Every structure is written in structure tokens, then in C-alpha cells.
Amino acid sequence: MATQALNRLQAEADKVFAELSPAAADAIEQSALTTSYPTGAALFAEGQSSRGVFLVRRGRIKLSISGSDGRTLILRIAGAGDLLGAASVVSGREYEATAETQSPSEVSFIRQTDLLRLMRVHGEIALWVTRHLSQDYSSTCRDIRDLMLSDSASEKLARLLVAWLNNSDETKRSCKLKMVLTHEEIGQMIGTSRETVSRLIAGFKKQRLIEQNGATLVITDPAALQSLITA
């Protein structure tokens, strides 16, 4: 049992630091404080002074922003290997979103002073942080494009399901998705209400585009779902 746990931890570390040399990965590990969090734990809040970055080792983290009217928009769901809060820490600004665990998670915290020191000493780590910033920027641009250029809520939902399908090697073979979000959270991702999401999913089922068995969603006709995306 202990050997299996060690192997799991090593596999997770390999995934998180896949782009780094062993020396650079060890330098980060020396400065990191790793903690296990239950579902629903807040890592940082929108508008809070940045104090460090959070490296996801295991689990899912929901990143969201809120408007003055109380509405919430989920930016993305982060997973193992994602670096959260880097833009705020590097720029010295407040956190731009709220990060909350969506499942039991293991996250490493690296203080702002330690991260900046590591970036100065190790060019490889500076490049690693830059890659994360670039990936976050590209992802945000795609999400804004999808949100703004979609003509209807049904197209937005189709885009989301197709994106989930394309982001998983396993689902490319089986066309199955694990539904980790509630209808309300899906609505917060595509800028619509829970009631609209429930109605759209029911409509997709009626059109035999999808089937659902508990938390498993089966994309029965990926081509037809893709055809709903016009822009």
C-alpha cells in the first residue's frame, strides 16, 4: 500500500514538472508548501492581495469572477499541473479571480518572494512560469471568442461539450464525458441560467445528440453537435 502511494505521488510530480529538469523541479519543491484541501475550500479570492502562486498537484480547482450584480462567471476548471495566480504575483497586483476546490485536492503554495527569487536564479523556471501565463492568456482569448461569437445559448453549450470532448484523450475514443459541474455551474461557464442549461440538455437528449447515465454523459452524435457551432 505504501509503495502504491509513493508511485502515485511520483507520477503526479512527473506530470506537474514534466517541462522542468530534475534540478529545477527540486528547487521548486524546496520552496513549496503542499496541503490537502477538501471540496469547497477557497485558495484565494478575487480582489485579495496576491501572496503567492498555487500549483495544482491533484484535484480540480474552479476559477470564477463575480459582477456587482452578484452574477458569477466560471472562467475555467484547473487541474493537475496548472499554476494559479501567477499573473497577479508577477505583476504585484490583486488576484483577478476566486479559486475554490471542486473536489478533494492537493495544492502546493509558493510564496511570491520565493517564486520571484527562483525566476531570477533559474531561467528555466522563469520560462516555465511564462509558458503558464501564455497558456492562460490563449485559453482566455478562446473562451471570450466562444462566448461573444456564439449566436445562441445552445451554441455556447455545444461549444463547451465539444471542447471537453477534445480536451480528453479518453473521450476521443469513447465519446464519454464525466459531468463534474452542476447545471448551475455550466450556466456560469456559458453566461446563462440553470433553467436554460437544463432545458438545452433535455433538448439535446431529445435530438439524440447526447445520452446521460448518472454523472456520465455520452456524446452520441459528435458531428451533429459540432454542426451547431457556426462561428
Image (cartoon, rainbow, N blue to C red):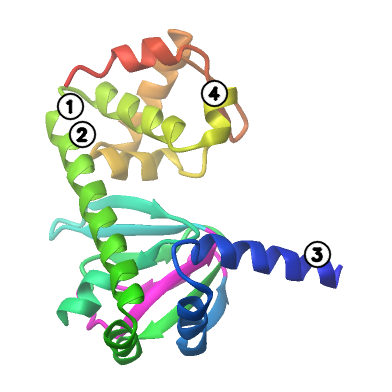
Residue 212: horizontal and vertical position, in percent? 57, 24
| Mark 4 element type | loop
Q: Amino acid at mark 2?
A: Asp
Count of numbered tags: 4
User: In the image shown, does 60 or 41 lie closer to the viewer?
Assistant: 60
Q: Are marks 1 and 2 in contact (CB under 8 Å)?
A: yes
Which residue lies under the disc numbered 1?
A: 150
Q: Which mark sits nearer the N-terminus, 2 or 4?
A: 2
Real-space Cα separation, disc 4 to disc 3, in angstroms: 30 Å
Q: Tell me which amino acid carries mark 1.
A: Ser
Mark-to-mark CA distance, 1 and 4: 23 Å
Q: Distance between the Cα atoms at labels 1 and 2?
A: 6 Å
Range covered by the magenta-colored residues: 38-59
Q: Secondary structure at mark 3?
A: helix
Q: Which badge, 3 or 1, comes first in the chain's sequence?
A: 3
- Residue 177 in view (yes/no): no
In depth, the one of 84 and 15 nearer the eye is 15
Location of mark 3 (residue): 4
**Residue 12 spot, x, y in % from top left:** 60, 63
Q: Residues within 10 Å of mark 4 (few under 14, many from 20)?
A: some
Percent x, y of residue 54: 40, 74
Residue 110 visible in the picture: yes
Label whose residue precedes the other's in the sequence (2 or 3): 3
Kindly identify which residue carries mark 4: 175
Q: Which residue is mark 2?
A: 146
Inspect the image, locate mark 3, and give the three-letter code of the amino acid beneath it: Gln
- The type of residue carrying mark 4 is Cys
